[in-house]
Amino acid sequence: MEFCKNCGLLLPEGADHCPQCGAPVFSTPQPPQGAAEHPFYMEQEPPRAGMSTAGYLGCLVLFVIPVVGLIFMLVWSLDSGRHPARRNLARAYLIRTLILAALFFVVVSLLLLVASVSVSYPVYYPYYY
């Protein structure tokens, strides 16, 4: 049963124009037989909502705690479940933490190298001259 989109009259079966107002009838196309398996006709999952501001804030506060935050970062970054926004946040924060740790170790090793050279240089200086 179809109704005219223009005047609302109940249209007879197979009509291509409305008998009252003459408006063309546009019927909705039906998927072809056996097309239910085709990905275009499959029902798609609705997009998931992102995290709220409180969710982001809670995650960031949790990530600041030294050992617990690292454990949550690892667990959430490997999670492929219901929260893609939390997973992406945990991965980004884990990458940031690894970069900062690498920079920290490079700077500390350079400072120790400079300190060892500056301490050893005055000790050996009188023996060479």
Image (cartoon, rainbow, N blue to C red):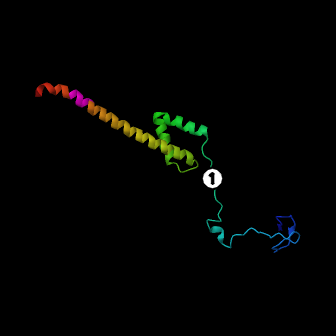
Q: Is residue 118 magenta?
A: yes
Q: Residues within 10 Å of mark 1 (few under 14, many from 20)?
A: few
**In the depicted view, which residue is nearer to us: 81 or 90?**
90
| Placement of 40 over or under 50, stated as above or below | below
**In the depicted view, which residue is nearer to us: 24 or 66?**
24
**In the depicted view, which residue is nearer to us: 82 or 24?**
24
Left or right of residue 69: residue 1: right
Q: Examine the image and state in which quarter residue 14 appears.
A: bottom right
How far across and how far down the image is residue 10, in percent?
87, 67
Whether residue 75 is visible here, answered yes or no, is no
- Which residue, given by chain and number where applicable, does mark 1 sit on? 47
What residue is shown at x 29% (from left), y 32% (from top)? 112
Left or right of residue 125: residue 40: right
How far across and how far down the image is residue 4, in percent?
83, 66
Q: Examine the image and state in which quarter residue 1 appears.
A: bottom right
What residue is shown at x 60% (from left), y 43% (from top)? 51
**In the depicted view, which residue is nearer to us: 111 or 88?**
111
How far across and how far down the image is residue 6, in percent?
83, 64
User: Is the stretch drawn in magenta largely helix, strand or loop?
Assistant: helix
Amino acid identity at mark 1: Pro
Provide the residue span drawn in magenta.
115-120
What residue is shown at x 48% (from left), y 36% (from top)? 68
| Placement of 99 over or under 81, stated as above or below | above
Whether residue 117 is visible here, answered yes or no, is yes
Left or right of residue 63: residue 123: left
| Placement of 56 over or under 21, stated as above or below | above
Q: Is residue 52 magenta?
A: no
Q: Residue furthest front?
A: 22
Kind of element beneath mark 1: loop
What residue is shown at x 54% (from left), y 38% (from top)? 59
How far across and how far down the image is residue 110, in percent?
30, 35
